[in-house]
Image: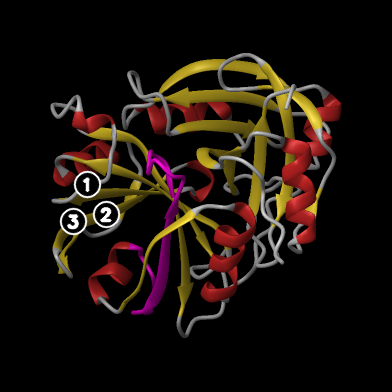
Amino acid sequence: MTARIPGTVVVDHAIVGVSDLEASKSFFEAFGFAEQDRRSLDASVAQSLYGIDTADELVMGVPGAQTGHLRLISTPLPTPDRGHFHRGGHALDIYTTDIHRSVGIAEENGYVVGPVADYTFGPVHLQQAQTMGPDDVPLVFVGIDRRLPSVLETAPERLHSELHSIVGCIDSLEDETLFWTDVVGLDLKSQFPIDVPAVSEFMMLPRHAPIKMSVMSGPAVNPPRFELLAFNDADGKSIAGRPLAPGCLVVGLRVDDVSAALKALAAGGADTYSLVEAVGINGQREHAAFATTPGGLDLEIRGPLEA
């Protein structure tokens, strides 16, 4: 029987490796995020979680949103050459209520932006565009006529949502999806192929590359969600998130018991690292640990000190 993380598991936030905290802060501020807290990490925490000797942490969120935060982690390592089809943490998504305004803001601030994809996929109509932040972090604007829950439901006058999804890229969609559902404990909401040239164009790929995708979430479907994609016919480099380099994206999970979660992840074939005590997004101390899935995706689990 497959080991499974006990209790409730939710996708909580994204960890972003950055070379320049202020430059990355300015990038996300342009799209509605605001600084909420910052701190220097203890050397033991930086080493145990991220494999680096020193790090500063900047927490950002969208005012009024209780979820969908970012934790920017400074790292002295060089930015890796990922290539167009790299495996690992792949992109961050936010909803937009006006994609052309979103693209305009990115251009006004000097960020590279790809073309706007405007297409119908099944029962929904989508507009998507991608901008590249510092350290080549891709941020995808998603305009859609059937949104999942977000801060936009209570504040429709806003242009952007909190973090809508974290996207990871792997080789085997079926195997990795099973790990995230059967071991991690997320719910699979949908799985589908995407063979739409406009999608490859907004992703700024050098050619059309069909993909397959799984969309997963915690039980309440609150943001952020987790999306897995696999390219059908495009090889790519595997970019590890530990040691954490600039531009690396890590999935932040919240669990009831970090120690028990580590045991389940290890039993399921993940590489796991030491449990440490660290400061959480809310400023309270909590347990934290890093792990890498059998498919090569990186995650960080957080939970209370007293399980």
Please say if the residues under marks 1 and 2 sit with CB atoms less than 8 Å apart.
Answer: no
Residue bearing the label numbered 1: 147
Please say if the residues under marks 3 and 2 sit with CB atoms less than 8 Å apart.
Answer: yes
* Three-letter amino acid code at the position of disc 2: Ala
Q: Which numbered disc flags the more N-terminal residue, 1 or 3?
A: 3
- Give the foreground label among 1 and 2: 1
Residue bearing the label numbered 2: 129
Q: In which quarter of the image is the C terminus?
A: top right
Q: Is residue 150 or residue 79 the one in the foreground?
A: 150
Tell me the SS state at disc 3.
strand
Q: Residue at x 53, y 66 (%)?
A: 177
The span from disc 3 to disc 2 (Cα, nearest Å) is: 7 Å
- Give the foreground label among 3 and 2: 3
* Three-letter amino acid code at the position of disc 1: Arg
Q: Which residue is drawn at 57% across and 59% down?
A: 180
Give how far across and how far down residue 219 sits, in percent.
43, 44
Residue, far front: 1
The span from disc 1 to disc 3 (Cα, nearest Å) is: 12 Å
Q: Which residue is drawn at 82% across and 36% down?
A: 275
Q: Image quarter for residue 297?
A: bottom right
Q: Which residue is drawn at 24% across and 56% down?
A: 128
Residue bearing the label numbered 3: 127
Q: Is residue 155 or residue 188 the one in the foreground?
A: 188
- The stretch of residues the image draws in magenta is 203-225
* Three-letter amino acid code at the position of disc 3: Gln
Whether residue 221 is in magenta: the answer is yes
Relative to 166, 199 lies left or right: left
- Give the foreground label among 1 and 3: 1
